[in-house]
Amino acid sequence: MTVSLYHLEYFLLILVRISGFMVAAPLFSLRNIPVRIKTILAVALAILVFHIVPYREVTYSTTIGYALVVLSEMLAGIIMGFMANVAYYILAFAGQIIDQEIGFSMVNQYDPITSTQVTITGNLYTYAVMLMLFATNLHQYLVRALTDSFTVLPVGAVSLNVGIYELMKRFMGDYFVIGFRIILPVFASMLVVNTVLAILARVAPQMNMFVIGMQLKVFVGLAVLVLMIMMITGVADLIFREMISMLKDSLFYLGGTEG
């Protein structure tokens, strides 16, 4: 079997975009996955895409031109992966607010996967949604979206639109809206608890509401979290919709047009 130099360059560009996607994409970017496994998966996907996607000649003038094409493909993969992964930060935000309302804000855990400090509730939501991702085969959607990106955004046609900041601005709005929708049951229950404590403080001023309030908030908060387990599918649906929307819109902005 003979392979021309042009086809080899085309294959390497495909491999670069896939590798960039796996650096920042959800699941694939986890630190506990061995680098050797990620490399084998990236090469295997690149071989499949190379045989599926029709060959398109990539035009460049010099070696520096080819290097710029490589950098643009790497940037495209990283941006797509990051836009898909950024939706997970909503769970960390929601978990931090929930723990702050309950009284667990000072209890942080070290997450070896992301090498960051996360709250207990944020870690719970992250792993629960990740399990939902596997259960609903959304990881297969990510792979399919990556392969389809070579049809929507051909190799060598990456043209970063300066208006991509509009995508992040829209995400920041969704970031707070979805986050507060997740924490709404806890926030409402804590509002009721604070109201009851305020009434008791006026009725019985000799009672130490600070001591009672700390314990009451913990018990009520944990009870609400148990009830919120039934809502975890709705939380996962919100995150998945945002993830898919960000991934699709990033392709349009990388293609030089607004989605």
Image (spheres, grey):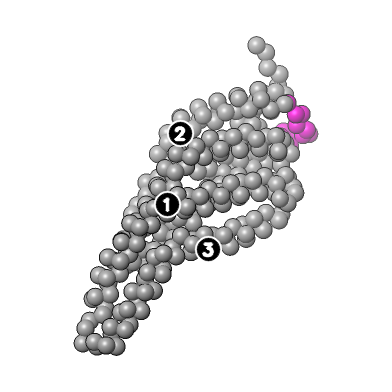
Q: Give yes or no for contact between labels 1 and 3 (Cβ–Cβ under 8 Å).
A: no
Check disc 2: other Cα within 10 Å, few if <14, some if 14-19, many if 20+: few
Q: Position of residue 42 (x, y in %)?
A: 54, 30
Which residue shows up at 41% across the image and 68% down it? 187
Predominant secondary structure, magenta span: loop
Question: Which numbered circle lies on residue 232?
Answer: 1
Question: Between tags 1 and 2, which lies in front?
Answer: 1
- Can residue 79 be seen at all in this image of the molecule? no
- Residue 97 on the magenta segment: no
**Picture quadrant of residue 152:** top right
Which residue shows up at 26% across the image and 78% down it? 210
Question: Between tags 1 and 3, which lies in front?
Answer: 1
Mark closest to the chain's N terminus, 1 or 3: 3
Report the magenta residues as a range: 55-66
Q: Which amino acid type corresponds to the residue marked 2 in the rendered image?
A: Val
Q: Which amino acid type corresponds to the residue marked 3 in the rendered image?
A: Phe
Which residue shows up at 67% across the image and 44% down it? 251
Q: Is residue 156 above or below residue 232?
A: above
Q: Which residue is mark 3?
A: 176
Mark closest to the chain's N terminus, 1 or 2: 2
Q: Position of residue 138 (x, y in %)?
A: 52, 40
Q: Is residue 17 above or below residue 237?
A: above
Q: What SS does tag 3 mark? A: helix
Q: CA distance from mark 2 to mark 3?
A: 34 Å
Question: Which numbered circle lies on residue 35?
Answer: 2
Between 5 and 162, the one nearer to me in the picture: 162
Between 90 and 223, the one nearer to me in the picture: 223
Q: Taking 220 as reference, is 141 left or right?
A: right
